Amino acid sequence: MIDTTEAGGGSYPSSEEEKVKTTTGTITITYSFQDDEVPLYWNEDDIIDYIKSNYREYTQELENVEIEINEVEEE
């Protein structure tokens, strides 16, 4: 095996640590649905539970995505 330690083999230059900042915010996604059929005896909570369990079916009706950045702090 060839010894490359004197030629710098096996050593890697260290890069400077990248400066970062932290941020917080809110993502609001709006879906539209219309004329969904549900059992007559379901109340509002039943409908909400159904939608939460099957929300992927509603992604086809994506209307709007709003992103709000609340805070940015440099470190």
Image: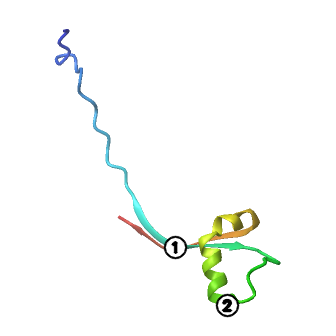
Mark 1 highlights which residue? Answer: 25
Residue located at (76% from left, 66% from top): 61
Q: Is residue 20 left or right of residue 4?
A: right
Residue in front for this viewpoint, 74 or 3: 3
Place residue 57 in its image quadrant.
Answer: bottom right
Q: Is residue 60 left or right of residue 72?
A: right
Mark 2 highlights which residue? Answer: 43
Residue furthest out toward the right? 35
Residue located at (81% from left, 77% from top): 34
Residue in front for this viewpoint, 66 or 36: 36
Q: Secondary structure at mark 2?
A: loop
Place residue 65 in its image quadrant.
Answer: bottom right
Q: What quarter of the picture does the C terminus occupy?
A: bottom left
Residue in front for this viewpoint, 1 or 51: 51
Give the residue type that dot 1 points to: Gly
Q: Position of residue 51 (x, y in %)?
A: 65, 75
Residue in front for this viewpoint, 24 or 29: 29
Question: Badge 2 local density, few (<14 within 10 Å), some, or many (20+)?
Answer: few
Q: What quarter of the picture does the N terminus occupy?
A: top left
